[in-house]
């Protein structure tokens, strides 16, 4: 039976095809305009060719922290000396204008940069992350009434109002005829700016910070590394599989929809001899380690240019003893990503899926992933919508939507038994797709059945 690690090898070719479809690189669809044409369109924003754009969003400080730092910076300003400005009124004019200008700059520049950074980065996100933003924004809008673009506009408009207020107070200050009046206007302006900042900025900035927290937790998928996404109905054991075969630690509980976001784990695969040859070892890297073996460097993580790796047998890695042969060494290694996804339900094709289900669909639609489809044929998936027949219909539905995806079927929880006739139905489905009827893995994590086969050992 096929194993998941053989499936991921075909992800390389799939990745190139998806990139072409995402970025519309087909030159036959491009049209050239005459250099003398006046109808020029602005260039489209450059789309990120990799994920991780959500983690590059500007980091927002709390409004109270912004205000405190601005006031502290303003308070440290020293008044001009009498030697440079002998006139007390002019000294007060100069000092007051500097304090108001410094205060407003300390408040408005971070706000400007945040709004500009958000709008710029959101236009260039990878398509998968654009879906994540849309789904998160939709959830915030439904639960809290927060609309991202409206929040950004509110912050920007508040910033503009603060700038106008500072200009008004500077003009008033310069119009004062006594140093005492000028000093009073300066203090009044600082208090008014602080009060207006708290009134206009605190609420939208807090809402934007809360939205950012959910966005920045989205895992960054490395498109140059093969990835496998676990798909299936709720409570069929996807999260337990991710925990068992990778460094991912998703939540595991006995109720549907435990997984409410994407969880990413990693596993390192080692080939012996030539790339694409026999898999000699599979290791789960520690979450805080990039590689389980310091001897395997980035030059070995080749995807598009497979070749033999010149590894000195005498410099075998510490774990080479697990290969079963003396004097053996890893000739090639590949870091693979294992993605846990929220469960999906059998729905009419016209029925809109919820945000969690849409996230799972987006991972298959926009990321070059292989699919590990997990079924629970024991009849105890935990939800009436996840019966055996519904799971098989859902599998057929998803497979028809993504027919060219590298695919592997896993029947989990076999220690709980299998409903009569369920395995035969699965075989019929596989045969109807032109596969052998036994191209699936029977898995039980509790009894350690099929685990080594799944890892490809």
Image: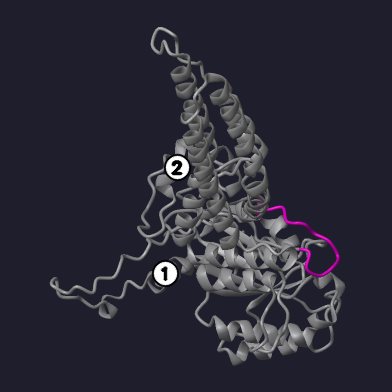
Residue at 48% in and 57% down: 119
Give the percent coordinates (x, y) of residue 376: 78, 75
Q: Nearer the viewer, residue 330 or 224?
A: 224
Q: Nearer the viewer, residue 112 or 378?
A: 112
Residue found at the very far left of the displayed protein: 36
| Other-residue count near label 2 (Cα within 10 Å), few / some / many at <14 / 14–19 / ≥20 | few
Residue at 45% in and 61% down: 123
Disc number placed over residue 297 in the picture, else none: 2
Circle 1 residue:
13
Does dot 2 land on a helix, a strand or a loop? loop
Residue 24 shows in this picture: yes
Look at the image and give the residue range highlighted in magenta.
246-258
Q: Nearer the viewer, residue 354 or 21?
A: 354
Residue 10 in the image: above or below residue 79: below
Residue 400 part of the magenta segment: no
Give the percent coordinates (x, y) of residue 409: 65, 75
Does dot 1 land on a helix, a strand or a loop? helix
Residue at 52% in and 34% down: 106
Give the percent coordinates (x, y) of residue 242: 69, 59
Give the percent coordinates (x, y) of residue 456: 60, 62
Image quarter in which the N terminus is found: bottom right
Q: CA distance from mark 2 to mark 1?
A: 23 Å
Residue at 77% in and 61% down: 448
């Amino acid at each position: 039976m096929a194993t998941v690690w053989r499936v991921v090898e075909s992800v390389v070719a799939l990745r190139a095809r998806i990139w072409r479809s995402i970025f519309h690189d087909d030159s036959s669809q491009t049209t050239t305009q005459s250099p003398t044409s006046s109808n020029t369109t602005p260039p489209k924003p450059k789309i990120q060719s990799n994920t991780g754009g959500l983690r590059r969003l500007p980091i927002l400080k709390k409004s109270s922290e912004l205000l405190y730092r601005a006031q502290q910076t303003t308070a440290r300003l020293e008044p001009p000396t009498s030697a440079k400005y002998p006139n007390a009124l002019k000294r007060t004019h100069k000092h007051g204008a500097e304090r108001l200008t410094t205060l407003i700059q300390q408040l408005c520049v971070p706000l400007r940069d945040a709004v500009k950074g958000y709008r710029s980065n959101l236009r260039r996100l990878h398509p998968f992350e654009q879906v994540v933003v849309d789904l998160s924004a939709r959830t915030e809008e439904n639960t809290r009434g927060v609309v991202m673009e409206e929040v950004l506009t509110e912050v920007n408009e508040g910033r503009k109002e603060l700038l106008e207020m500072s200009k008004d107070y500077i003009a008033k200050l310069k119009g004062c005829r006594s140093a005492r009046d000028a000093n009073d206007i300066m203090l009044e302006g600082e208090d008014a700016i602080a009060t207006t900042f708290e009134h206009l900025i605190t609420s939208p900035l807090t809402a934007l910070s809360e939205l950012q927290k959910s966005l920045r937790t989205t895992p960054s998928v490395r498109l140059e590394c093969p990835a496998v996404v676990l798909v299936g109905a709720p409570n069929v054991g996807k999260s337990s599989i991710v925990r068992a075969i990778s460094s991912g630690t998703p939540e595991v509980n006995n109720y549907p929809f435990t997984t409410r976001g994407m969880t990413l784990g990693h596993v390192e695969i080692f080939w012996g001899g030539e790339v694409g040859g026999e898999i000699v070892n599979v290791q789960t890297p520690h979450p805080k380690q990039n590689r389980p073996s310091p001897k395997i460097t980035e030059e070995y993580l080749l995807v598009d240019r497979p070749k033999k790796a010149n590894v000195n047998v005498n410099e075998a890695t510490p774990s080479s003893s697990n290969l079963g042969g003396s004097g053996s060494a890893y000739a090639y290694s590949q870091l693979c990503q294992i993605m846990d996804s929220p469960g999906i339900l059998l729905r009419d094709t016209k029925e809109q899926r919820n945000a969690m289900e849409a996230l799972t669909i987006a991972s298959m639609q926009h990321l070059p992933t292989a699919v590990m489809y997990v079924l629970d044929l024991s009849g105890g998936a935990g939800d009436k919508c996840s019966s055996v027949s519904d799971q098989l219909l859902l599998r057929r539905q998803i497979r028809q939507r993504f027919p060219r995806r590298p695919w592997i079927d896993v029947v989990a929880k076999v220690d709980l038994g299998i409903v009569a006739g369920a395995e035969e139905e699965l075989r019929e489905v596989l045969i109807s797709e032109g596969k052998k009827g036994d191209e699936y893995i029977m898995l039980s994590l509790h009894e350690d059945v099929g685990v080594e086969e799944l890892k490809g050992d």
